[in-house]
Amino acid sequence: MIKRAVFPGSFDPITLGHENIIRRAMPLFDEIIVAVGLNIEKKNYFKVEDRIDWIKHVFADCPNIKVDSYSGLTVDYCRDIEASYILRGLRTSADFEFERTVGQVNKKLHPSIETIFLLTTPEYTSINSSIVRDVYKNGGDVSSFIPKEVKLPKV
């Protein structure tokens, strides 16, 4: 059986922290699906098509990394595509508390799906998409926070 993991998120935009987690997880799984979650209640800044395109460019050198989008519960998406693992990155203890709760609910809903946590490397701990968007919207240079393949439109 293929070891397939889903790395879900909004990736609005993808950051160097996201890329780092995915690349470090590659040896652990046969395939990783970077799954852009579509949530109609959440206002995203960048178009989903752009976010998917950026992720594909970042991982163009990685045949075992796939990109998809989904809506609904992540565990239902995992079940639908026969993924046994959900991959999550942890930057802080607050991330852990939130992700632990979500992971426990997911385990209750679909006991066969495991949540795997990887700690963010120290240099990426302060980076998140919200901060990157705020810097970007205010005309700041975000090049040290996002992969070089991500070409954001001019503000």
Image (cartoon, rainbow, N blue to C red):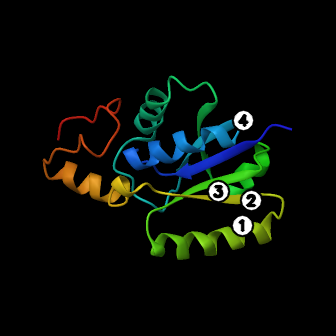
Q: Which residue is mark 1?
A: 106
Q: Report if the CB atoms under discs 4 and 3 are less than 8 Å apart.
A: no
Give the CA distance from mark 4 to mark 3.
Answer: 25 Å
- Identify residue type, mark 1: Asn
Where residue 103 sits in the image (x, y, percent)? 66, 68
**Would you say residue 95 is visible in this rendering?**
yes
Structural distance between the alpha carbons of marks 2 and 3: 18 Å
Residue that numbered label 3 is attached to: 72
Q: Which mark is residue 150?
A: none
Which label lies toward us, 1 or 2? Answer: 2
Tally of numbered tags: 4
N-terminal label among 2 and 3: 3
- Residue on which disc 4 sits: 30
- For mark 4, does the 10 Å Cα neighbourhood hold few (<14), some (14 to 19), or many (20 or more) residues? some
Check residue 114 in the rendering and tell me which mark sits there, or answer none: 2
Pick whichever of labels 1 and 2 is earlier in the sequence: 1
Amino acid under label 2? Glu
Instruction: Report crowding for label 2: few under 14, some 14 to 19, many 20 or more residues within 10 A (C-alpha).
Output: some
| Mark found first going from the N terminus, 1 or 4 | 4
Is 101 above or below relative to 120? Answer: below
Query: Which of the two discs, 1 and 3, sits closer to the camera?
Result: 1
Q: Tell me residue 15's x, y (percent).
A: 38, 46
In-image side of 39 versus 80 (left or right): left
Disc 3 residue type?
Answer: Gly
Determine the residue positioned at 61% across, 72% down: 100
Q: Measuring 27% from the left and 52% from the top, which residue is drawn there?
A: 133
